[in-house]
Amino acid sequence: MITDLKPYAEYKESGLPWLGQVPGHWELAPNRSLMRIRKKLVGDRHSAFTLLSLTKLGVIVRDISEMRGKFSSDPGTSQEVRKGDLVMCLFDVPETPRTVGLSGHAGMITGAYTVMECRRPESAKFLELFYIAMDDRKLLSPLYSGLRNTIPKERLLGTKTPLPPPAEQAAIVRFLDWANGRLERAIRAKRKVIALLNEQKQAIIHRAVTRGLDPSVPLKPSGIPWLGEIPKHWEVSRIKNEFRCLNTHRVPLNAVERGTMTARTYDYYGASGVIDKVDNYLFDDELLLIAEDGANLVLRNLPLAVIARGKFWVNNHAHILKPRRGNIVYLANVLETLDYKTWISGAAQPKLTQDRLMSISIAVAPPDEQLTIVEQTSEQTRPLAITISRLEREITLLREYRTRLVADVVTGKLDVRAAAASLPDEAPLDDLAASRDPDDDALDTDDLTDTEADA
């Protein structure tokens, strides 16, 4: 059905530099006629509101118990969000994971964002889809202003949006909901297989770095409660004996520097793991990066021990460790087996402090055995890694296809009216937020503070 889609019969120039032509019968509506800014602070009523978050999955209810991301020191500065409002992040647009989301919930969100009330409620879902398509391809750059690449609210309201007739909007929404459901089911199925393969892979590695490769070797008590017995010839050490901590070597980025970074040269490690390529930091040696953010460590939202080779930009959510001795891959595998919950402190913002991290006891094999463990586990897990890589690539291709399909439909490159009318009835997709993709989970825009957003 998707492959049978055709263009419209007639087009006209939109006058929008990022859009080009649109179907001839579509309206070019000024955004002022479609939405208006509403900023109503919750003040001392904040305890009566549900906290919301803008993510790659849209506007979701934020689980305060998980302490994910950052929280405003004054919840009274949050603003009301009504069901059917558009929530927009109009600052740092090129780097922002998601610029727009249609709220299906009533609640509150940090005052850093722009809440738009839809003047035409029947068009709200189409507007979300249109601006998601613009955001995914970062096509709104002509509207950016200043070092922070901000879209001024008045400029956005003065811009026009191509708008099909109401019945056609409904057809587009119905078709894309159906297509997204099919693609999302395929992606979820592949993620489940990846999770099972990763469990197998980690079980092989965990066994090797805690018991060695020879099951007949004599064992001894490690003295580490969670570890139990280890090979008799292994050493019980502490992280501080195996690593130097280079946290003081980190050079922080300020808001202006973040806004001016356009050359994406080096890997970036933050609370969400290795997520992008950015510029400006030097490391000439192999290092390990360990999350400092205790919430992420508890939730296992990222690889716990990431090997940084070459030049990395490292934010203030990572401990930077340089091995004093031993094989870096082996040591990364050892640290990946740890359960850090015992060493995490702090309720409002749980952290793994440097002192606690460096005091953790670990079992260490002799140097020659470390290399053997790395080589043999690599060989044993290679088929699993190959399959995981293939499935991840397939997921990437499905996501790219979905992004292109949405863009082509909401900008009028493809006519879905007939296809939408003949769609089969299917069970609705389960709530996306209830089964969040780890990749999407890492992309909450609320990792930014209000201060950063207002800069």
Image (cartoon, rainbow, N blue to C red):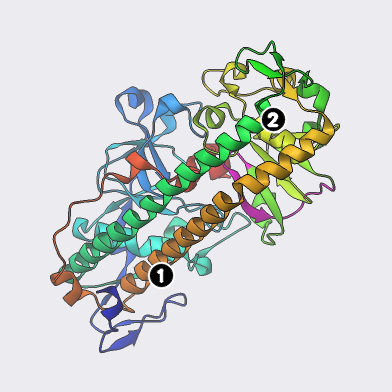
Whether residue 151 is visible, yes or no, is no
Residue 432 image offset from top left, x and y in percent: 32, 46
Circle 1 is placed at which residue position? 404
Q: In this view, does 223 lie to the left or right of 339?
A: right
Please, what is the three-letter code of the amino acid marked with disc 1?
A: Arg
The answer to if 278 sits in the magenta stretch is: yes
Q: Which mark is residue 214?
A: 2
Q: Residue 255 carries which label?
A: none
Task: Say which residue appears at 79% left-offset and 34% top-offset.
Answer: 369
Sequence order check, earlier mark of 1 and 2: 2
Image quadrant in which the C terminus is located: top right
Task: Report crowding for label 1: few under 14, some 14 to 19, many 20 or more residues within 10 A (C-alpha).
Answer: some
Secondary element under disc 1, as helix, strand or loop, is helix
Q: Is mark 2 on a helix, strand or loop?
A: loop
| Screen quadrant of the N terminus | bottom left
Q: Which of 72 and 129 is in front in this view?
A: 129
Residue at the image point whose x is 69% and y is 19% from the top: 230
**In this picture, residue 400 sits left or right of residue 409:** right
Instruction: Give the distance between the C-alpha atoms of the residues marked 1 and 2, in whole angstroms.
Output: 51 Å
Q: Name the foreground residue: 307 vs 441.
A: 307
Task: Please report the bounds of the magenta region as a residue range.
Answer: 270-284
Q: Nearer the viewer, mark 1 or mark 2?
A: 2
Q: Residue 79: x and y, percent?
A: 37, 37
Q: How far across and down, in percent of the image, does residue 59 sit? A: 35, 45
